[in-house]
């Protein structure tokens, strides 16, 4: 309670200062560092409204050095960051020429440690680069369909346990271009509160009606489903053509895992379709790394559309959709991406093929299995230690995404900078990616992290936590969101 | 490109489709060309602004629409002071191969106070003395254009796209461009390939003159085919071959063109039909075969290609 009040007070003070500064800038007392409109275009309607940029100018600019940090090495367990300095309070940056080496990387989505520049994946990619080149310069339906793409799609389908799969060049584009191809006007989309921007954009572009249910809350979802079936479309009362439920495997800002068994039970009861976005969970969850379906031990045939990206666990880029053969054939002809957007680049395809074979164990080593086990151990160890220290951690026990709550705006900047001083790179997130009083630092664990690296990191986090007074769990804040599996563990830390 | 700042996206389609909604919101007005490519259409749809389409490359039509808008504005000056106006055009249109009349667009811009967004996917690396695109081709000051967006998948043979312009305009996208904030960045391999390609472009400005020559040659060589007409400028590297008289139904047209493509393929000339999603496009272009020229093709190859297409077309259409 006290924390919430202090957070609001913090934002209030910043807003006041913001207004004061704007006033001074208007009176030309304070120098305006921002780029301004051209002289010739001064009488055009202004491109940005003043208030939109209020947040950017006054709050974001103060702590801007925590974001967009340029790195100059492979984003593995350790990374090299280029040092930047700002002499005018973050309005502009200069590179000092130093490189901070060996920063422990707790921010990259490198769940299985495939972000390397040595090893089988890299050699295979180099070979394909020499053979096929980099660019494809055409769309899938025209001259961009390489034999490598066909090979990859068969492999993805066998990995997921579905009939067929189709790959696309960008994960964001996969969602925003295929949801409009699957649903249209007259359909209903039920989407989780905290869905990713790509799902929201795809749902908006499709023209269907969108209804939102509370995060991971099955009662809310059931109520919406019941209403939809009973009342039908809003004005005409006709039944909906299709009902599509959009959920994600692991939510990247919360670290929570979707309650898949219950969602599938609801889906079967009310005959709706399920679209599962496994961007973070593929490769990271489950005893064989096949994602959230594997984690719960369910049948992949139950999920109608399985979507995922190759950016996180496979160390490449791009997205895929897997499902029944009719669905994929339909998408091959009707997806916006297949007709207008270029296909995956050949070396990237080779990287995915090699890493997927490694995870499945098809390349003859047990490297894949070891990585998956290492990741699971790391996750459990890290979360347990952080909870013991007294931080507030969101999310499921088994999810490798660990958000640590910071709450106050000043602590966002302070946490980021202190950690960098101690050679640990973290990602801090604030408004607008999270609700305004719930800013957090997000740790992404990886199979490449060894026990020593984690211990070093934990020691530093402990110190910084004491320094900044981040160990909130005594305050027993009632969780605002329904967290599925860890109500019991809160009792443990309450001493 | 000699601009202040540029921002890189990891996918060409997402570049323009994220750039337009970052600036133009509900209540703003966008004037777009009818033959704009699909990525632009999606960007416009995501922005929820009022869209007014003007006839392809018809400046008189655009002026008419702008005048109508001005009259509307005078009725309601308070609203007019906050509605932003944008004109979206392509340098070289992918769907028709025509070039946009940029000097007139710039004149209209200053007369009616609208901002210009230019999409240079096809013209970047093709037009102009140094390949800087349609602004260099016409000799216009690049600061006159508010935003130039292009994808690196055509001339630079990499993956991804970029937007360039003044810092005032581009910096906004770092926090509000959806494809930039919410998506993974470009793999270093592809970025390095693009950097190398740009270095090559800077070192050999002679490339562009050679490309222009070849485009003109192909254009002339394909002129005389009976039954097919060539659509596109003579210096555009991608031209369309459309049927002179359509058979009436789109499917039959597509079948005929596919016959031509298949026969050419069997004589080792790779062509493709321009593909569109028929239900989703706002203004569907007629079916056509897209012919694309590269700098690497030699003169004999070009001649042979043109001759083969002629033969096949005569065989199939007569």
Image (cartoon, coloured by chain):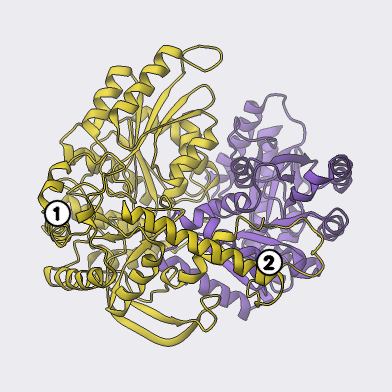
Residue mark closest to the camera, 1 vs 2:
1
Q: Which mark is residue B211?
A: 2
Residue B151 visible, this angle:
no
Q: As displayed, is residue B291 above or below residue A188?
A: below
Q: Quadrant of residue B115?
A: bottom right
Left or right: where A124 falls relative to B137: left
Q: As displayed, is residue A67 above or below residue A53?
A: below
**What is the count of numbered marks?**
2
Residue B167, percent from left and from top: 64, 69
Q: Few, some or many C-alpha atoms within 10 Å of disc 1 (few <14, some 14-19, many ≥20)?
A: many
Q: Secondary structure at mark 2?
A: helix
Residue A401, percent from left and from top: 26, 54
Q: Residue at x 44, y 34 (%)?
A: A331
Give the residue pinned by disc 1: A376
Residue A415, percent from left and from top: 33, 69
Q: As displayed, is residue A395 above or below residue A203?
A: below
Q: As displayed, is residue A244 above or below residue B313?
A: above
- Specify the quadrant that holds the C terminus of chain B: top right
Instruction: Tell me, by letter, which chain the rendering colours yellow.
Output: A
Q: Residue at x 68, y 66 (%)?
A: B211
Residue A9 visible, this angle:
yes
Q: Residue at x 41, y 68 (%)?
A: B189
Color of chain B here?
Answer: purple
């Amino acid at each position: 309670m006290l924390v919430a009040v202090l957070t609001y007070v913090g934002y209030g003070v910043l807003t006041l200062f913001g207004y004061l500064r704007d006033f001074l800038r208007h009176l030309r007392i304070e120098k305006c560092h921002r780029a301004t409109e051209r002289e010739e275009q001064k009488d055009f309607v202004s491109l940005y409204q003043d208030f939109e940029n209020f947040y950017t100018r006054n709050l974001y600019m103060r702590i801007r050095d925590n974001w967009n940090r340029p790195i100059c090495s492979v984003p593995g367990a350790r990374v090299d960051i280029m040092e930047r300095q700002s002499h005018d309070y973050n309005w502009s940056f200069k590179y000092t020429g130093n490189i901070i080496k060996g920063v422990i990387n707790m921010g990259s989505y490198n769940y299985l440690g495939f972000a390397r520049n040595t090893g089988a994946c890299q050699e295979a990619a180099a070979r394909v680069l020499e053979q096929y080149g980099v660019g494809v310069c055409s769309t899938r339906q025209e001259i961009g369909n390489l034999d490598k793409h066909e090979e990859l799609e068969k492999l993805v389908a066998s990995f997921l346990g579905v009939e067929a799969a189709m790959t696309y060049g960008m994960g964001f584009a996969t969602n925003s271009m295929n949801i409009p191809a699957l649903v249209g006007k007259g359909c209903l989309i039920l989407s989780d509160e905290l869905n990713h921007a790509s799902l929201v954009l795809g749902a908006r572009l499709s023209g269907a009606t969108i209804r939102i249910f509370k995060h991971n809350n099955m009662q809310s979802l059931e109520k919406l489903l019941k209403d939809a079936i009973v009342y039908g479309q809003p004005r005409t009362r006709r039944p909906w053509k299709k009902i599509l439920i959009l959920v994600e495997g692991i939510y990247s800002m919360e670290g929570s895992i979707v309650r898949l068994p219950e969602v599938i039970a609801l889906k079967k009861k009310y005959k709706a379709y399920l679209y599962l976005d496994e961007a973070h969970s593929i490769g990271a969850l489950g005893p064989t790394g096949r994602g959230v379906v594997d984690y719960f031990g369910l049948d992949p045939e139950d999920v109608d559309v399985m979507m995922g990206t190759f950016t996180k666990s496979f160390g490449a880029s791009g997205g895929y959709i897997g499902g029944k053969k009719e669905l994929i054939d339909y998408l091959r002809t009707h997806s916006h991406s297949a007709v207008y957007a270029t296909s995956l680049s050949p070396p990237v395809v080779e990287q995915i093929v090699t890493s997927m074979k490694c995870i499945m164990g098809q390349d003859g080593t047990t490297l894949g299995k070891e990585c998956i086990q290492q990741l699971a151990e790391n996750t459990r160890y890290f979360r347990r230690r952080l909870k013991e220290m007294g931080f507030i951690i969101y999310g499921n026990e088994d999810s490798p995404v660990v958000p640590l709550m910071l709450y106050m705006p000043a602590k966002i900047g302070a946490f980021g900078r202190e950690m960098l001083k101690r050679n640990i790179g973290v990602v801090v997130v604030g408004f607008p990616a999270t609700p305004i009083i719930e800013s957090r630092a997000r740790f992404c664990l990886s199979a490449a992290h060894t026990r020593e690296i984690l211990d070093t990191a934990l020691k530093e986090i402990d110190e910084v936590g004491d320094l900044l007074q981040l160990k909130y769990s005594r305050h027993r804040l009632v969780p605002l969101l329904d967290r599925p599996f860890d109500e019991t563990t809160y009792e443990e830390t309450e001493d | 490109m000699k601009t202040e700042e540029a921002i890189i996206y990891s996918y060409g389609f997402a570049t323009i489709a994220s750039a337009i909604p970052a600036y133009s919101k509900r209540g703003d007005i966008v004037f777009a060309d009818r033959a704009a490519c699909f990525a632009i259409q999606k960007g416009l749809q995501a922005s929820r602004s009022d869209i007014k389409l003007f006839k392809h490359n018809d400046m008189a039509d655009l002026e008419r629409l702008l005048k109508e808008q001005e009259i509307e504005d005078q009725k309601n000056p308070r609203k007019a002071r906050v509605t932003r106006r944008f004109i979206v055009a392509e340098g070289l249109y992918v769907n028709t191969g025509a070039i946009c009349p940029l000097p007139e667009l710039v004149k209209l811009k200053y007369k009616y106070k609208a901002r210009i967004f230019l999409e240079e996917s096809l013209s970047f690396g093709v037009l102009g003395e140094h390949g800087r695109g349609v602004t260099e081709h016409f000799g216009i000051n690049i600061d006159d254009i508010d935003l130039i967006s292009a994808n690196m998948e055509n001339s630079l043979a990499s993956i991804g796209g970029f937007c360039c312009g003044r810092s005032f305009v581009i910096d906004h996208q770092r926090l509000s461009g959806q494809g930039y904030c919410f998506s993974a960045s470009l793999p270093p391999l592809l970025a390095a390939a693009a950097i190398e390609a740009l270095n090559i472009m800077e070192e050999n400005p002679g490339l562009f003159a050679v490309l222009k020559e070849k485009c003109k040659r192909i254009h002339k060589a394909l002129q005389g085919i009976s039954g097919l007409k060539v659509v596109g400028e003579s210096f555009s590297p991608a031209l369309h071959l459309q049927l002179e008289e359509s058979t009436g139904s789109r499917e039959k047209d597509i079948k005929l063109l596919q016959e031509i493509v298949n026969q050419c393929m069997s004589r080792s000339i790779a062509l493709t039909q321009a593909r569109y999603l028929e239900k989703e496009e706002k203004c569907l272009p007629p079916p056509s075969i897209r012919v694309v020229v590269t700098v690497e093709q030699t003169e004999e190859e070009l001649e042979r290609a043109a001759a083969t297409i002629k033969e096949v077309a005569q065989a199939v259409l007569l």
